[in-house]
Image (spheres, helix red, strand yellow):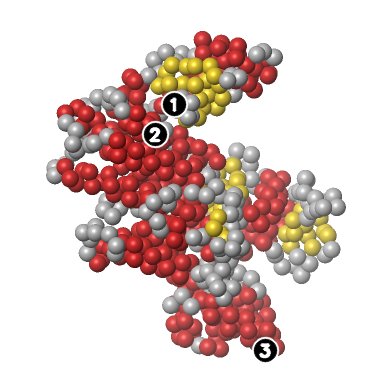
Amino acid sequence: MASTYELLLAPLRAAFDTLEPGADPVLRTSEHGDYQANGVMALAKKLGRPPRDVAREIVDRADLADLASVEVAGPGFLNLTLRPTLIQDQLSALLGDDRLGIEVAPARTIVIDYSAPNVAKEMHVGHLRSTVIGDALARMYRFAGHRVIARNHVGDWGTPFGMLIEHLLDVGEDEAVASLSIGDLDSFYRAARVKFDADDPFKDRSRARVVALQSGDVETRRLWKILVDQSITYFNQVYALLDVTLSPEDVVGESHYNAMLGAVVADLDGLGLLVESDGARCVFPPGFTNRDGDALPLIVQKRDEGYGYAASDLAAVRDRVEALHADEILYVVGAPQAQHLEMVFAVARLAGWLPEHVRCEHVTFGNVLGADRKMFKTRGGETVKLVGLVDEAIERAAASLRQRDNGLDGEGQQRLATQIARAAIKYADLSTERQHDYVFDLDRMVAFEGDTGPYLQYAHARLCSIFRRLGAPWRPVHVTFGLDALQERNLALALLAFPEALEMSFVTFQPHRLCVYLFDLAQRFTAFYDACPVLASTGPLRDERLALCDLTARTLSIGLSMLGIDAPEQM
């Protein structure tokens, strides 16, 4: 079914187009009407006419009679109020639609690069945003009907592995595996680093081991794989704890591209793009300069003939386009990598490895801060580990649940505490505009009131309790949506806006737009629930209100699922 947004936009777009081919209105839900159309003033400026005159002409030309009444407001805004018949038809269609108006898109291949921890290092709060935002985008794209290929570009190659392998040999394979298998990766890494810094013979052995690793020595590769496999097992445990959809099959680390690096350099050289600079082989993509205005190089091969991150990243772009046939590539990576990635994309386009029809975007994000608004760390100044963060959130949620009588047994309480903890952590991250920093405050995040994940979960559980109290399964019948109460109409309009909210999240790669929508929906439901008795109503009014509750519960459930958040039926 066409969404309300699409039904309104089509005639408006046609009217704009008659005045200026290609001109487009901007349509948004509004406080001044059900929807507001902007873009008239920009069109009027092009035409050299008064904006209100242009607005009135658009109203005359747009075929909106069966959809909405239109009022010209201010300097040229169009306020649209939906016809009752349109609302009735749209809500009735939603009742029989499992996807609630979200049409399945023509399938495209979307590669999403996210999480990217380092082998032999534990995941910490610095990995949270990439993991949570990337996973939400992956879920949203899958729901829309696209083929999503996740790429967990772990750091599993390079000079540190010489010292890690030598340390593994020193402590013995069995002891090393025992340590790594319980997730004690940081202690293993620190011990290897201390030895490397203090022991010259160990340092020499480590450097020789790096050469053996890079040259393909069989025994060295076997030892390296022990480190990688144990780390991936640990990563998978963290993802399971957070309910993140990444799997071991999605791990395609730096090592995967190692065999492709020679071809990257050779092909760039063949294209005449490589330039020698201070002994290194570089590409100077146009438009990138330092503070002094000098051209910036992207170093592809270092003076010692080793390869840097740029070579691996170029190989990854090339592989994702040529082997995976990506239509769109998203890099959910922190802001400090912005210039590096922009240069990689520019060089890939110069080389023809990233065609213009393939969209390639850096989905950047801000930092997680502590209460002092500095980078979030423990009291001892160490980076906060993700496992400890989730465990603490589960403890807080469990303590809160012990104060509630929800009828769940011990196992059910623990499962619910885990669901609430995940919701608290994920929603706090996703509800923040991703380019912004946010303060990590568990007390606020696990609260059942305010703009939090548990508040949305509680709204869903409250809706489910209505249907439990019915005492019999409820099936949608032919419902007449009179919407006589203001709170009923406000809730109905929010339900119709779901496709628009999801679309805006896609266009901007901003899951927070979906969060804003879901929080507004939950607030409108609360206002409706307080003002409009449901089970105490009778006849058609009862059916109407039950239908609104059903649609709200389903919308919250689907919306939360796309954020990676469970929607419990009982809290």
- Identified by mark 1, the residue type is Asp
Kindly identify which residue carries mark 2.
494
Q: Is residue 509 left or right of residue 519?
A: right
Q: Viewer-proximal residue, 86 or 10?
A: 86
Q: Which element carries disc 2, helix, strand or loop?
A: helix
Q: In terms of image quadrants, where is residue 369?
A: bottom right
- The CA distance from mark 3 to mark 2 is 66 Å
Which part of the image, by quadrant, shows the C terminus? bottom left
Amino acid type of the residue tagged 2 in the rendering: Ala
Q: For mark 3, what is the residue? A: 199
- Residue 416: give x, y in percent of width and height: 31, 60
Q: Quadrant of the N terminus?
A: top left
> SS of the residue at dot 3?
loop
Judging by the rendered image, the residue that carries numbered circle 1 is 34
Amino acid, disc 3: Asp
CB within 8 Å, label 2 to label 1: no
Please tell me which residue lies in front, 149 or 502: 502
Estimate the x, y position of residue 35 in percent, counting from the top left. 47, 26
Q: Is residue 135 left or right of residue 290?
A: left
What residue do we see at 75% from left, 67% from top?
Answer: 305
User: Hey, which quadrant is residue 87 in on the image?
Assistant: top left
Of the image marks 2 and 1, the number of the one nearer the N terminus = 1
Vertical order, 127 against 472 (above or below): below
